[in-house]
Amino acid sequence: MSYLQVRNYEAINISKEAGKYRTWMLTLLGLFFVGVLFELITTLLGKIYGYWKSSPVDDWLGFSLTMMVKIYNGVVLYIISLVGYLSYSNPKLKKQPVSKAVADEQVKSILHIMKAKKPFLSADFSLSTFAELMETTPSILSKLLNSYLDTSFNDFTNKYRIEEVKDKLRKGLHKSLTLEYIAEDSGFKSKTTFYRAFSKFSSQTPKEYIKQLEKEKKVS
């Protein structure tokens, strides 16, 4: 399955769910319109009929009919508000199951983009910008990273940045550039974040890694 097919698959699912919500809302709005129409009719009948008779029975019937219409409208409005809130706060689109084949293709696309385009080199690289690049949502992208790559977005990004730093160190750029500059050029905003990430993914400090490289060169 190609990346374009994956996007089409997602688009079809989103379109189906959006169609369901539109149908629900149009139905509820139709019911609300009927209620408003009933209220207008009862008001007109009350005005007209009230001039002919004004017995207690007539008043009671008119009051009952009016209250029934108002309760009907109130219930419909409540349902519309409830459906709108649920669709905004906990939409079914986010819970849409993704098949393993689709997820595998998405993961391949993630890895391909990180390797080919290296978006992590930008210090402003974020989950939302990556999701935009992937033409998906941040929630779906985060779920893919957590469920299929067993990592968070920050760790995933920093690991690529550390590999970029190591590649530059292997090329000997630290001899003409500062370590901080190399880290910044690899996408790190903070020196503290860089050193913490390097130790986490390399089990050694940058200076220890440089010493290791120098020893390996002497041996070879």
Image (cartoon, rainbow, N blue to C red):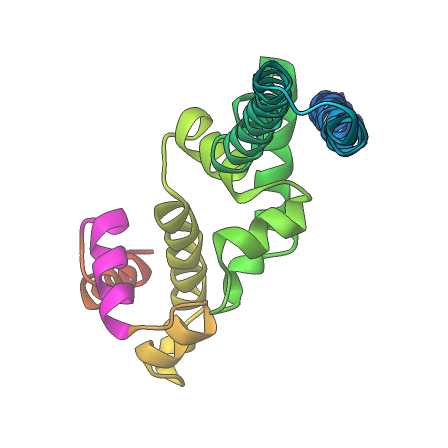
Give yes or no for residue 14 being in the magenta stretch.
Answer: no
Q: Compare residues 113 and 217 and report the one nearer the observer.
A: 113
Chain part drawn in magenta = 191-203
Q: Residue at x 48, y 30 (%)?
A: 90
Q: Quadrant of the N terminus?
A: top right
Q: Position of residue 32 (x, y in %)?
A: 70, 28
- Residue at 22% in and 70% down: 192
Q: Main secondary structure of the magenta part?
A: helix
Query: Which residue: 37% across, 30% down?
Result: 150
Which of the 4 quarters of the picture holds residue 5?
top right
Count of numbered labels shown in the rendering? 0
Hey, which quadrant is residue 39 in on the image? top right
Foreground pick, 157 / 81: 81
Give the quadrant of the C terminus: bottom left
Considering only vertical position in the picture, is 85 above or below 30? below
201 within the magenta span: yes
- Asked whether 68 or 81 is in front, the reply is 68
Could one spot residue 15 in this view of the protein? no
Lateral position of residue 72 relative to residue 31, left or right: left
Residue at 31% x, 73% y is: 190
- Residue 213 in view of the camera: yes
Left or right of residue 35: residue 191 = left
Q: Position of residue 160 (x, y in %)?
A: 44, 52
Is 102 positioned to the left or the right of 41 in the image?
left
Relative image position of residue 156 (x, y in whole percent): 41, 45
